[in-house]
Amino acid sequence: MNQLVNRAYNFNAGPSALPLPVLDKAQQELIDFRGTGMSVMELSHRSAAYEEVHNQAIALLKELLSIPEDYEVLFVQGGASLQFSMIPMNFLKSEQQAGYIMTGSWSEKAFSEAKLFGNPYHVASTKEGKYRRIPSLDELKFNSDDAYVHLTSNNTIYGTQWQKFPDTENVPLVADMSSDIFSKPFDVSKFALIYAGAQKNLGPSGVTVVIIRKDLLEKANANIPTMLKYSTFSKNNSLYNTPPTFGIYMLGEVLNWAKSIGGIEEIARRNEEKAKLIYDAIDQSNGFYLGHAEKDSRSLMNITFRLKDEELEKQFLAEAKKEGFIGVNGHRSVGGCRASTYNAVPYEACKAFSQFMVQFQQING
């Protein structure tokens, strides 16, 4: 099937592109889900039909990410923004410190929430350099008695991504992986807790995946509201209350699609290939396009750049929109241009955008 038939070149930063085969299947099952006579959105979350959907999604995540046995997979709501609060609420005591590695706006937001509960501090920060890079491992200075160390694995606004994760030894490592989970292989066992909004690589908005080591669960603060405890979700298989059933169904189908094309290794190969098309257009432009991120910190998911002239940049964005490239404006807080090349964005879309960039330079350079 041609994945671009009547489809936009969708470079939105999130919610973002979903695989067309997944959308096709969801459309086919929308009215009558597997002979139930109901949509999956109409099923009781206590029904056997939905329970199968729910458990399969968890099993696929464990399989495709090679999640060890001593971890739980939870489905919660509220996005990464709620996790910014839930993590310190559960794991940071008022007299404790927690280290935050500052690499962009989302780590700033997480840090601000942690200040409400304990004593967070900056392990390292690249803010002075306008968040153009990820700190080197040598720059990271944390304390052995920290409650945890927090990082943001990929920065959607600035287009940077961790290439190698730190070893925090006995200090729990926590990661916001909202914008690059399942984009390339990584070792889950390095982390005590991983959280990710689904709306970039895993499915539609509304579901937040939490992967948490069981021993960390046992250390959580018990004196907080029920729905803000990770243990509530763990003890009830994320079914304490009504979960976002359609979103979890879609997440499972995205994982089935990923498995069918070769899993995370093939996803990573495709992502590298797609990103290279656009980075090559930047690097070979002789300064016409100016990449924001330093080369050794570049993201495979969010490619950020500017043009040498502000008026030319406005023209570029206007013409890109006219040509059907959606979502290539930079984040409202920084401006510029951004192409988000998440897993479901097809190679053809990235090739077309790369060609547009080259042609625009030829005409306006």
Image: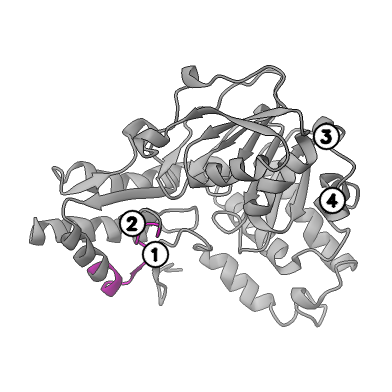
* Residue at image mark 1: 327
Q: Residues within 10 Å of mark 3 (few under 14, many from 20)?
A: some
Q: CA distance from mark 4 to mark 2?
A: 39 Å
Q: Earlier in the sequence, mark 4 or mark 3?
A: 3
**Type of the residue with mark 1:** Gly
Quadrant (top left/top right/bottom left/bottom right) for the C terminus: bottom left
Q: Would you say 68 lies left or right of 203 here?
A: right
| Position of residue 353 measured from the top left corner of the image (x, y, whole percent) | 29, 59
- Graded by Cα atoms within 10 Å as few (under 14), some (14 to 19) or many (20 or more), the crowding at tag 4 reads many
Q: Nearer the viewer, residue 7 or 138?
A: 138
Name which of mark 4 and mark 1 comes first in the sequence.
4
Depth check, mark 2 against mark 1: the one in front is 2
> What's the distance in space between the residues labelled 3 and 1, CA to CA?
39 Å
For the residue marked with disc 4, what is the amino acid?
Phe
Q: Position of residue 243 (x, y in %)?
A: 79, 63
Tag 1 secondary structure: loop
Residue under the point 66% across and 46% down: 84
Residue receiving disc 2:
335
Residue 328 is inside the magenta segment: yes
Which of the two discs, 4 and 2, labels the residue nearer the N terminus?
Answer: 4
Tell whether label 2 touches label 3 (CB within 8 Å).
no
Q: Secondary structure at mark 3?
A: helix
For residue 233, the mark is: 4
Disc 3 marks a residue whose amino acid type is: Lys
Distance from disc 4 to disc 3, alpha carbons, whole Å, reads 12 Å
- Residue type at mark 2: give it: Gly
Sequence-earlier tag: 2 or 1: 1
Q: Tell me the tag on residue 363.
A: none
